[in-house]
Amino acid sequence: MENASRPPDRPAPRLLAVSKTRDADAVAAMAAAGQRAFGENYVQEALAKIEALRGLGLEWHLIGHLQSNKADDAARAFDWVQTVDRAKLVEALARHRPPSLPPLNVLIQVNIDDEAGKHGCRPDEVDTLAAAIAAQPTLRLRGLMAIPAPDPDMTRRRAAFRAMSALFDATAAHHPGIDTLSMGMSEDCVEAIEEGATMVRVGSALFGARTAREAG
Ligand SMILES: *Cc1c(COP(=O)(O)O)cnc(C)c1O
């Protein structure tokens, strides 16, 4: 382990099982083994699984890009949306989350490598978005999420994780209730945890490789 910088007061990491492209039976098998939290990339694909497995008391996270015109379905069906990156989406999710349900847990997705054409807000936009989320009674700000560039150089990936960790601390200074920093996938979840992740999103290492067609 190289000089890890995980802050000692970070909550222990949780495992999010990424179940995109897996059928409801595969999710049910993982649930029977004790896994509760599952991540999906596409609203339409997720709705059928959420409905089929309703009795199991699972926790569903949307981790794919969310178009505003799907905010209605997402706000009703999911427990968490990890990909909030613009004010318009905050407003749409808040409006569509039924007040009869607990507040929708929300993470702000950050484009930490400043990659052109990639989803996620800029780091300097986090403060404004966090304030907008915190002002909505039907939403609950839980923290930040990132998908750093899949750089083969792990030192550069660690630098992105570390930048996210610093941004998380800066956000927590204004929003002490936040507890979630979602970063790290099958390939780099160990490095992400060492750098401060409190949630890793793992698909292929749990369920096996996806075919290229399914890779999404
Ligand atoms: C698919 C996906 C994952 C999981 O990727 P694996 O490499 O299969 O672990 C994690 N996060 C997001 C946003 C994804 O789209």
Image (cartoon, rainbow, N blue to C red):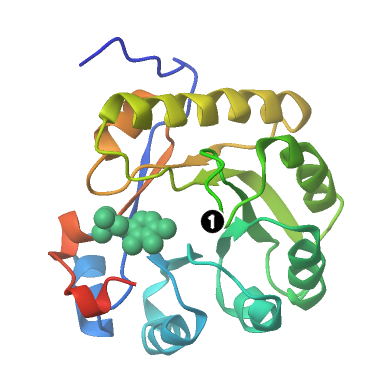
Quadrant in the picture for residue 213? bottom left
Residue placed at 82% from the left, 66% from the top? 91
Residue 37 seen in this snapshot: no
Rendering quarter of residue 96: bottom right
Q: Which residue lies furthest to the right in this view?
A: 135
**Looking at the figure, which quarter contains the C terminus?**
bottom left
Q: Can residue 53 be seen in this view?
A: yes
Q: Classify the position of the N terminus by image quarter.
A: top left
> Callout 1: few (<14), some (14-19), or many (20+) C-alpha neighbours within 10 Å?
some
Q: Which of these two is toward me, 182 or 8? A: 182
Name the residue: 28% across, 83% down: 24
The amino acid pointed to by label 1 is Lys
Residue at image mark 1: 118
Q: In this view, does 182 lie to the left or right of 91?
A: left
Q: Is residue 44 left or right of residue 20?
A: right
Q: Which of 42 and 142 is in front in this view?
A: 42
Residue at figure coordinates x 21%, y 67% from the top left: 30
Tag 1 secondary structure: loop
Residue 38 image point, x, y percent = 37, 64
Relative to the observer, which residue lies in front, 123 or 42?
A: 123
Residue at (82% x, 42% y) in the render: 128
Q: Residue farthest to the left? A: 208
- On screen, residue 60 versus residue 131, left or right, reads left
**Residue 16 drawn at (x, y percent):** 36, 54
The quadrant of the picture showing ligand 1 is bottom left
CB at disc 1 and ligand 1 closer than 8 Å:
no
Q: In this view, does 130 lie above or below 52?
A: above
